[in-house]
Image (cartoon, coloured by chain):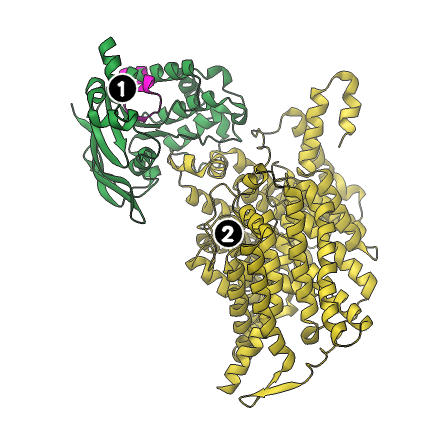
Chain colours: A yellow, B green
Amino acid sequence: MAFFLAQILNGLANASALFLVASGLSLIFGVTRVVNFAHGSFYMLGAFIGVTLMEMLPGHVGFWGAILLTGLAVGLIGAIVEMIVLRPIYRAPELFQLVATFGVILVIQDLALMIWGAADRMGPRAPGLRGVVRLWGEPIPKYDLALIAITPLVLLGLWYLITRTRVGILIRAATQDREMVGALGVNQAWLFTGVFALGSALAGLGGALQLPKGGADLLMDFNILGPAFVVVVIGGMGSLPGAFLAAILISVLGVFGVTYLPQSTLVLMFVVMAIVLIVRPYGLLGREEVAGEHGQVGRPEPPIRPYGQTARLVVMALVGALLLLPLVAETFVQILVIDIVIFALFAASLHFILGSGGLVSFGHAAFFGGGAYAAALLVRHASAPMEVAFLLAPLLAGVLALGIGWFCIRLSGVYFAMLTLAFSQLVWSVAFQWRSVTGGDDGMISIWPAAWLSDTTSYYYFTLLFGIGGILLLRHAIHAPFGYALRAGRDSPRQAEAMGIDVKRIQLAAFTLAGAMAGLAGGLFVFAKGSVFPTELEIARSFDALIVVFLGGVKTLAGGVVGATFLTGVEDWLSRLQYWRLLLGLLIIGVVIVAPEGIVGAVRGAWMRWRGSAPGLKSKGGAAT
Amino acid sequence: MTEILRVERLVKSYDGFLAVNGVSFSVAEGELKALIGPNGAGKTTCFNMLMGQIRPTSGDVFLGAERITGMRPRRVWRKGVGRTFQITGTYQTMTVIENVQMALLSHHRRLFDLRSRAWKLFRGEAFEFLRIVGMAEQADRPCSELAYGDLKRLDLAIALTHRPRLLLMDEPTAGMAPSARVELMRLVAEIVAEQGVSVLFTEHDMDVVFAHAHHIMVLNRGELIADGDAAAVRRNPKVQEVYLGGGTLFAAEDANA
């Protein structure tokens, strides 16, 4: 019993930092609608800045003063990031901002590496709170008790700020109706900056507060991101008391998970999130999302048309060039093109549901990795010939997508995204922990293609055939009645329903098709590499696809393919440099600011202006973007 | 005359507030019937319960002899009910004609077709519907560029595609210029006469209502207070109370007529 109570206290202490990070994330999302991936980076910055300040400032005043100063410093950094990176792109398509915040993650990672080095830092002990007290005979760190006391105080402070002050009224009003608040004469830009700074400061405080328990390291940003999103979603996006409850729930469950069911730790919180979302689609204390809130903001995309003569010739010339490439190029170029085509197909499959369906999936890697694993498992455990395994990969990935989609399609917007994320984490943890079957984190190796495909050039043509074939199939589907029905359900679900379209069924079918195509890419991948590891199922892989779709342009048809080609090419070139993440991050942020409609969107815009402009201005218009 | 729609003691309660309180009426075949009432009377709620956008708290809706209470909109549509909305929800990223083609694709059950090119299918048929509402010249414009009145006409064309038996029109002329209103309602009246479709519509513009509706129902605070022809509704003291606070404008009009 005593042990049990001590466990609960431990969980409550862990909840402290998690709540601080999650409450900031929740505030930022509630007001600005930005899904801030970089929030974990602010948490990490808080930890490193906190360590540095604590080393400089002595004693009690120094320790607590350092924590407060850290909050201020990270808040300031947040404000600067918001002004430089986010302010120019609030008018961009919904969720486009997350690409920019992804760029911020990369930049902060390398900056932290430059400034503080790669070594982990031990956090200093809090003066006066070293050692333990004995409660029910169990040793409880004094600092844990301090954290347990601080968290409700922070909640109380935030509650006072939100419900009792003028700023709080504005924040709440903006959470419910941004445009109205703007119409009432409130300077939205500064409100957004202020909220972003406040949210970042909370993350920074969280990072500094947990120092005596956890220290500082360069993996903190991604490690906190998952739990923080889970907490925000379980609590209900935008609800602070919800985030508080959920932080406690997740932390306490986490502590018990470690004790009683160690293999559950990686996935426990995602299971909880999936259950909560299935039972309560808007989280514990969240409100129902207003229809259209997550619709496409900004200019509606122009009506789609299959490519005209010119564009078709360009595409055919490109394909022709790819076909001739092995005659001139060395093996490593062929391998690079194989990588690009596989990634392009994966991105195109996500783009299909995201662009035409308006379904933002955060867990698409489940089907890419799922296809790869399906093929590898068939080869390893059923001794299936490569050809059979390869053909079954998209099929099995499709079945997986059908099952996962059945749960997810009922939700919409960010909640849909989060449930797909939860399911993809489930799939990942199965691959990671079922060692006897999947090999765990050692993955599965020596999964090679059949003899007739064993040399690189043969596999190159094989990849071209299925990769480009898959991409063309998806494009064809977009122009087919099915694709139109999918877009109808995205543009106006009410109207679609009132003309006999079963929107959810169409969406589920599209989700399944996209899953199958991602699985096809996975099948190509596993035989190209000869191996598969759980990393192919990770959140990071899902985000890769998401990033390139937005980078290429959501409201265009070629966006996924172009974005994937661009990023793979650039990465291949940049990753030879030492601080390549910094450069890649800056490049992503640059593209996002210069071309808020994505690369293809910007090129299309330039092309339209060029054709529409007076002859004398032609060259100028063409060079504008 | 046979009934196409019969509504029995329809009730919608929101936490005890009765938005629609025991409404019963029917629409005859080939009839153009108006449902009027002040803002907040429950007209749109009523409409939403007829087609299934909202599930009624109690009461029944019959289409012909079939009970359709609480049926999903898409199923009610398949049974031959068309609908236009107070605020149009046309597909912004499609052209005008593609909006009509979409409805035809659904009507011809081609939604899961992965092979054809959607924009080539039923184009001629869609063009005919656009011609009926006078939108043929704008067929290939992006829907997002249309003027509001044109969106309303497009909405009507879409609602006609599956040759409905009953058309529900929620404020078909709201937000349109007065001349355009008269024109649109004349068009609707023509369609009723030619195709034998029944129409139930809500409207704020009394000129439109009294000029075209065969019968008029008046809804106030969720209750039906009148149901009859134009003259009877004008004379109804309850209606005068609601619209004029007991004034005599209708009476004066009657005297003039």
Side of B160 relative to A255 (left or right): left
Residue at the farthest top position: B256
User: What segment carries the magenta color?
Assistant: B190-209
Point out residue A204 in the picture as x, y percentages from the top left corner.
Answer: 69, 62
- Badge 2 crowding class, 10 Å Cα cut-off, few under 14, some 14 to 19, many 20 or more, is many
Question: Which amino acid, by three-letter code, is at mark 1?
Answer: Ala
Which residue is found at the position 39% from the left and 23% from the top? B156
For discs 1 and 2, the disc positioned in front in the rendered view: 1
Observer-nearest of A264 and A135: A135
Please count the marks in the image: 2
Q: Is residue B208 magenta?
A: yes
Q: Quadrant of residue A46?
A: bottom right
Residue indicated by mark 2: A416
Q: In the rendered image, which quarter contains the C terminus of chain B? A: top left
Which residue is found at the position 68% from the left and 51% from the top? A101
SS at mark 1 in the image:
loop
Q: CA distance from mark 1 to mark 2?
A: 46 Å
Point out residue A499 in the picture as x, y percentages from the top left corner.
Answer: 38, 33
Q: Quadrant of residue A296?
A: top right
User: Please, which chain is the residue tagged with disc 1 on?
Assistant: B
What numbered label is drawn on residue B247? none
User: Please, which chain is the residue tagged with disc 2 on?
Assistant: A
Q: Is residue A606 visible?
A: yes
Q: Is residue A57 above or below residue A421?
A: below
Point out residue A613 in the picture as x, y percentages from the top left corner.
Answer: 72, 20
Residue indicated by mark 1: B213
Point out residue A500 in the picture as x, y percentages from the top left corner.
Answer: 37, 36
SS at mark 2 in the image:
helix
Which residue is found at the position 52% from the left and 65% from the top? A246
Q: Is residue B178 magenta?
A: no
Question: Which amino acid, by three-letter code, is at mark 2?
Answer: Phe
